[in-house]
Image (tube, rainbow, N blue to C red):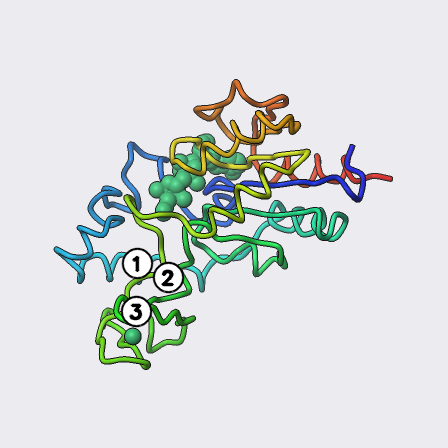
Amino acid sequence: MFEPNTKVVILTGAGISAESGIKTFRASDGVWENHRIEDVATPLAWMKNPKMVWEFYQGRRKQLLEVDFNVAHRALVELEKYLEDHFLLITQNVDDLHSRAGSERLIHMHGELRKLRCEKCENIVIAMEKSHLTDKFVSCEKCSSNRLRPHIVWFHEMPFKMNEIYDAVERCEVFMAIGTSGHVYPAAGLLAIAKDVGAHCIGINLEPPENVDLFDEFHQGLAGELVPELISKWIKK
Ligand code: OAD
Ligand code: ZN
């Protein structure tokens, strides 16, 4: 089904990392690792209670050291090797499992847990050493700020690289959404754009997502089973 020059855009969400042991966001009534999302993932929460938000994200950051990518992440690397520059992976996930699996043409639209950012000078650092993972705030080495924030897109903030994302989606021939519930915009709106430009739209998810009717094909089940199986079928010469 895929020729080596087919332009493919993939959007992934929490479901692709679920089998690696990372909890999805909407798994249990909007409560995420014992917190309501709005208590920890908004700029207001950071302003009012930075210690709580910091400790919450330190927990998520430390978890990265305990988990590993799975066969679905790996299958996307195989697809990228086949399509090279015709491939783009957009992830809503803030874990680093796609890049650890080997994905290179990758956009983290909602930020990355392994990075911290200075609110004063916008310095962005990869901070995964032991000294960066305690309950104490990490200070900026470039300016006087004594508190870096998680490099995460919170609710009410603009996702990263939206121009690049829209450009790729508007030009794609196949759009695939994997492991995402279709609740959070603008990510959830990319499917409608792909559909509008005539791309063949494929969904893979454990449950039918919000926007399931827009897919040309929907495959219901585990990403770890379906993604490797479908991709090896599609790139078979
Ligand atoms: P959700 O938690 O909303 O949805 C995850 C989807 O994955 C659900 O529809 C599940 O049915 C499905 N799922 C679970 N396990 C699966 C598996 N093993 N294989 C396939 N599918 C599976 O997560 P997202 O859609 O990624 O934003 O959430 C979008 C954004 O909302 C997140 O990026 C996050 C959150 O607020 C930020 O942190 C900025
Ligand atoms: Zn700074």
Q: Residue 191 at what x, y percent from top left?
A: 53, 30
| Amino acid type shown at disc 3 | Cys
| Amino acid type shown at disc 1 | Tyr
Q: Residue 11 at what x, y percent from top left?
A: 54, 40
- Is the residue under label 2 in contact with that under label 1 (CB below 8 Å)? yes
Q: Is residue 30 left or right of residue 197?
A: left
Q: Residue 220 at what x, y percent from top left?
A: 57, 26
User: Mark 3 — residue?
Assistant: 118
Looking at the picture, does residue 45 appear above or below residue 127?
above
- The numbered mark at residue 57 is 1
Secondary structure of residue under mark 1? helix
| Amino acid type shown at disc 2 | Arg
Q: CA distance from mark 2 to mark 3?
A: 17 Å
| Residue that appears at 21% across and 76% down | 146
| Residue that appears at 59% across and 47% down | 89
The 10 Å Cα crowd at callout 2, few under 14, some 14 to 19, many 20 or more, is many
Q: Quadrant of the N terminus?
A: top right
Sequence-wise first label, 2 or 3: 2
Residues 109 and 126: in front is 109
Residues 204 and 18: in front is 204
The 10 Å Cα crowd at callout 3, few under 14, some 14 to 19, many 20 or more, is many
Can you tell me whether the CB of the residue at mark 3 lies under 8 Å from the nearest atom of ligand 2? Answer: yes
- The numbered mark at residue 61 is 2
